[in-house]
Amino acid sequence: KQEVTQIPAALSVPEGENLVLNCSFTDSAIYNLQWFRQDPGKGLTSLLLIQSSQREQTSGRLNASLDKSSGRSTLYIAASQPGDSATYLCAVFNSGGSNYKLTFGKGTLLTVNP
Amino acid sequence: DTGVSQDPRHKITKRGQNVTFRCDPISEHNRLYWYRQTLGQGPEFLTYFQNEAQLEKSRLLSDRFSAERPKGSFSTLEIQRTEQGDSAMYLCASSPNNMAGHYNEQFFGPGTRLTVL
């Protein structure tokens, strides 16, 4: 059974700081990995999708890396802003077997202080 | 197209009542998913449709829960005889079946917040 862990559970940083969010998964037989952002009481916004054959994806100030063999992904946020405050969720899509669902971590609650 | 939509956004009901939620996926997305999210947790998979066929159901989906997707378009999730433990955010997502470079990228709606009193 796939399990996804996100560290840290919460992070508070001053505005302008670069930061890294971590995600690990137990079953490396994944098809892809998605990073999402969730604002309080809202749905999920897809940030980045990394296919299993890729090592990283970039969008603006966000960079996500994937090391499939070690079961790890990181989300790097450059020059953080108060508007980046949200919960960031990592989810993996497994290949084979029950390959229809995303398995999520519990998320990292990020607070960027002005 | 403005993305996945869900209705209602909020629902408050008394224990024992039945509730029904609706999800409209992104046009031409033939895959549709339901997830449930409780406070402080990541979303958990409930069920999956490809077109009108329900292909997988989680063990979380007890016999009080039923989901349909007639004609492969919108979907409904019904909960009968609601219990306080059903209180959660119910999220719907859709994805295209085969889109180069974005296979199964899932796009989520705003969710329906259910409170069972």
Image (spheres, coloured by chain):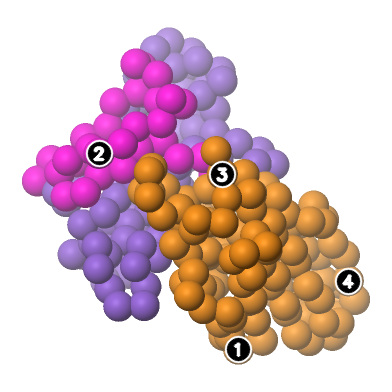
| Chain identity for the colour orange used in the image | A
The answer to whether marks 4 and 2 sit on the same chain is no
Q: Please, which residue is most extreme toward the right here?
A: A14
Q: Please, which residue is most extreme toward the left here?
A: B71
Q: Which residue is mark 3?
A: A2
| Chain identity for the colour purple used in the image | B
Q: Secondary structure at mark 3?
A: loop
The mark closer to the camera, 3 or 4, is 3
Q: Which residue is mark 2?
A: B55
Disc 1: host chain: A
Q: Is residue A50 above or below residue B50?
A: below
Q: Position of residue B14 (x, y in %)?
A: 48, 16
Q: Which mark is residue A13?
A: 4
Q: Which mark is residue A60?
A: 1
Image position of B28 (left or right of B47): left
**Few, some or many residues within 10 Å of mark 2 (<14, 14–19, 20+):** few
Q: Amino acid at mark 2?
A: Leu
Q: Secondary structure at mark 4?
A: strand
Q: Position of residue A26 (x, y in %)?
A: 63, 49
Q: Amino acid at mark 3?
A: Gln
Give the spatial CA distance, label 1 vs label 3.
30 Å
Disc 4: host chain: A
Q: Which residues are magenta?
A: B42-71
